[in-house]
Image (tube, rainbow, N blue to C red):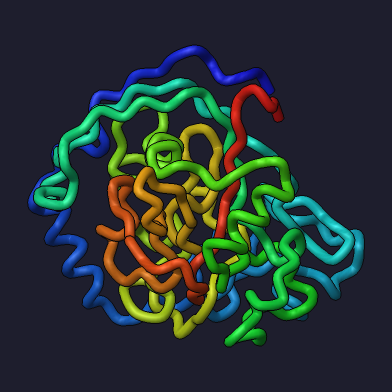
Amino acid sequence: MTAPSQRARLVAVGVVSLVGIGLAVVVAVGHSPAPGASCGGGFFPRAARCCVAPTGACGGGDAPSGLPCPTPLTRGPRGCVGAPRRVAIPETDVLVGPSDWEAEGRVAPRRVHTAPFWIDAFEAQVDELTCPTCLMPRPALYRAGDPGRAMGGLDLATARAHCAAKGGRLPTDDEWLVAAGGARPRRYPWGDTGAVCRRGAWGTARGPCATGGEGPDTVGAHVDGDSDLGVHDLAGNVAEWVETPSGQPRLRGGSFATSLATELRTWASRDVGPDARDDAGVRCAYDAARGR
């Protein structure tokens, strides 16, 4: 992988949306629950999850070692996981403004500049994050044999410590926005089209993708929601901690608990306290000078 290119320019976050799109979101939220998770190729929909095996542990931890893992996962010692991989994000200028009608009153016009950086392709998974307190109060969500499930239940301090241990840090609020926006203005990480269920793990308890599920899904299981640079799950699965200039703890990207598509927009964020919450996870960033 080459280092980030010197410059990429964006003119806005989001594009002008049609009223019909907003109406479609309202109608979708009222739909009856989906029959099963909308998974990428090679995954097996099982209730509210996208699993790597048709039976047994969802993450394939009890499957024969010869069982192939669906793209983009690879086989680890305890099952299928998202292998460590960093994506280069180029130096970027972004004019942030309420060009999306639903952003009116929520996004103040400003110009964002970010230096080149790297960001993890996957959210932190059960297999890579040692955090006994993260298992509380719902340890049943993180069973053995499911190593590639995104890890939720993180507080801000744990998220910071995890990234520091990897030689990285939390992405800044602006860096996360640029990673999600891609190389041109986009409403969602994948583009401007709607937040349908196959694009991310969201609304799994309530909303258009409701399957009676709880907790995050396998990382990388919704490849139709990838960014143009190949960053997975920037919308849905677990909300991701970011650093803000004021120090206000903030989550971005929506999560499995998100019931409204607007919460998955690249401009959307949620200011919270620093404590752990079921749907909070982490994705790490790295200065460009540190390389891959």
Residue 229 at x, y = what percent? 52, 33
Q: In which quarter of the image is the C terminus?
A: top right
Total numbered labels:
0
Q: Would residue 123 appear left or right of 75 to someone viewing this image?
A: left
Q: Would residue 276 appear left or right of 287 to someone viewing this image?
A: left
| Rendered image quadrant of residue 76 | bottom right
Residue positioned 44% across, 60% down in the render: 236
Q: From the viewer's side, name the closer residue of 47 and 136.
A: 136
Q: Quadrant of the N terminus?
A: top right
Q: Can residue 41 be seen in this view?
A: no
Q: Can residue 66 be seen in this view?
A: yes
Q: Is residue 272 above or below residue 233?
A: below
Q: In this view, does 140 lie above or below 192?
A: below
Q: Is residue 64 above or below residue 10?
A: below
Residue positioned 30% across, 81% down in the render: 32
Q: Would residue 117 appear left or right of 256 to someone viewing this image?
A: right
Residue 163 at x, y = what percent? 65, 50
Residue positioned 59% across, 32% down in the render: 118
| Rendered image quadrant of residue 167 | top right
Q: Is residue 38 above or below residue 170?
A: below
Residue positioned 66% across, 86% down in the render: 140
Residue 73 at x, y = what percent? 71, 52
